[in-house]
Image (cartoon, helix red, strand yellow):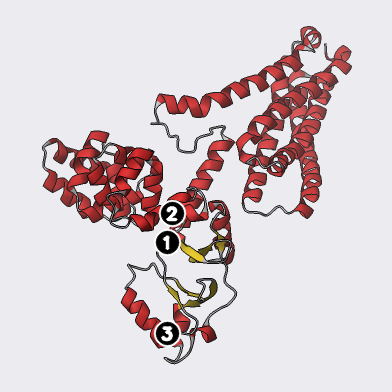
Amino acid sequence: MIINTDELLTVLQDALERDDFDSAIQMLEALRGPDQAVLFSELDDDEQQELLPKLELSDSADILEDMDDPETAKLAASLPTETVARIVDEMELDKAADLLGDLDEQQKEAVLARLDDADEVRPLLVYPDESAGGLMNSEFFALSPQMTAKEAVESLRHWSPDGDEVYYLFVIDEAKKLCGVVNLRALVLATPITLLENIMDRDVISVNVNVDQEECARTMAHYDLAAIPVVNEENVIVGVITHDDIVDVLEEEATEDVYRLANISDSELNPDSSIKEQLKGRLPWLYLNTLTALFGAWVISNYEYVIAQAAVLALFQSVVAGQGGNTASQNIAMAVRALATERVGARTQRRIIIRQFFMGLLLGVAVGTVVALGVYLWRGNIYLSLVLGLALVANLSLGSMIGVLIPLGLEKIGVDPALASSVLVTAATDSMGFFIFLSLAAYFLHYIQ
């Protein structure tokens, strides 16, 4: 079970206030790595800076590996270079590269100059954080196809990998090009003199070093892989991505999509982020929303004379616009999800658009009928009920289709469909809703007054 940090945090902070670092360290060391990171993240900045150097290097490394990247970089930037270097030396290479990549250039070079394995970390720094190269671990086990099963087992025993990091044994030729993969079960069951080339699978699934991390996650999920090799343009293996790295990617990508659907551009934001960071991530979208709202107000302004003669219309215009927006939002969520998991092919797009239009039509009839009946029983005006019902049918039909068209269109031009879909769709459905409802009301105005 995941630990409850509330009680532990109180005890830990009490120990730190008494300068009882031995008790604080004992408490942290009794926890698993991820639990250590969660508890450590709850401490104040000054408490973190004071406690981290006093922990065992392996525990400090585990904590930095499991903390969120912005928190890790902030903490590392506040510590002496020598301390950071000693901790980074204990970290996994890919995690170490992620941390160094978030530091400013001067501190990064200063830390690299003090690392024991700087030559192994530097190659990872050239790749973007969100690429296969930035995600991979450059430590992996590779064998020759001419080795026997016995030689492979002896090599594996000599290498002595940490924990359960070895999922597959990759086979490379003399040019270090990836040519096969052997799973541990096949190796154990093979006779000692069996050559690896006779038991290896030559159809190896791999990803290019420059591929986006989201594509890596999709590939591993699609083929149900525990690990995937990363190759360069010459098909030379340069690293391996394991399932634990992909879990972090899936969480990160899901958070990013949720934030973008809510019009927050920075997926690292949280309620406790600084005022400056929150303003930067949220204010631009509020300005854009304001502009779209003003556009809707302009549409209404063209029908001031209608509302002036039938004030009752003001009660219901937001119903039409709101229901159109709700329908479109449902489709946005489905479309963004389908695009993220590559479930929308070129051939299916036209069918989806047509289907969603008819789906919106059915929803509009269902909602419009109920609302029209309710308004008639409430206001007793059959023409007002008719206008409201027809407007709902039209706006839900168009809103449902637009909720698919806009994400597909943004994907087509290379823009993340989650980034601006909700803003554009809200503007479209609100404006259309006002226009349709007030246009119909203008036509039947004589009967509504």
Q: Position of residue 81 (x, y in %)?
A: 26, 42
The secondary structure type at the circle numbered 2 is helix
Tell me residue 388's x, y (percent). Answer: 78, 25
Q: Nearer the viewer, residue 172 or 368?
A: 172
Q: CA distance from mark 3 to mark 1?
A: 25 Å
Q: Are marks 2 and 1 in contact (CB under 8 Å)?
A: yes
Q: Residues within 10 Å of mark 3 (few under 14, many from 20)?
A: few
**Quadrant assignment for the C terminus:** top right
Q: Nearer the viewer, residue 196 or 217?
A: 196
Residue 32: x percent and y percent?
28, 56
Q: Which comes sooner in the sequence, label 3 or label 2?
A: 2
Viewer can see residue 2: yes
Tell me which numbered mark, 2 or 1, is placed earlier along the sequence: 2
Identify residue for label 3.
Answer: 188
Three-letter code, disc 3: Val
Q: Amino acid at mark 2?
A: Leu
On the picture, is 46 further left or further right than 289? left
Residue 138, labelled with which disc?
Answer: 1
For the residues bearing labels 3 and 2, Cβ distance under 8 angstroms? no
The residue pinned by badge 2 equals 124
* Position of the N terminus by quadrant: bottom left
Q: Is residue 279 above or below residue 108?
A: above
Indicate which disc, 3 or 1, sits on the residue closer to the N terminus: 1
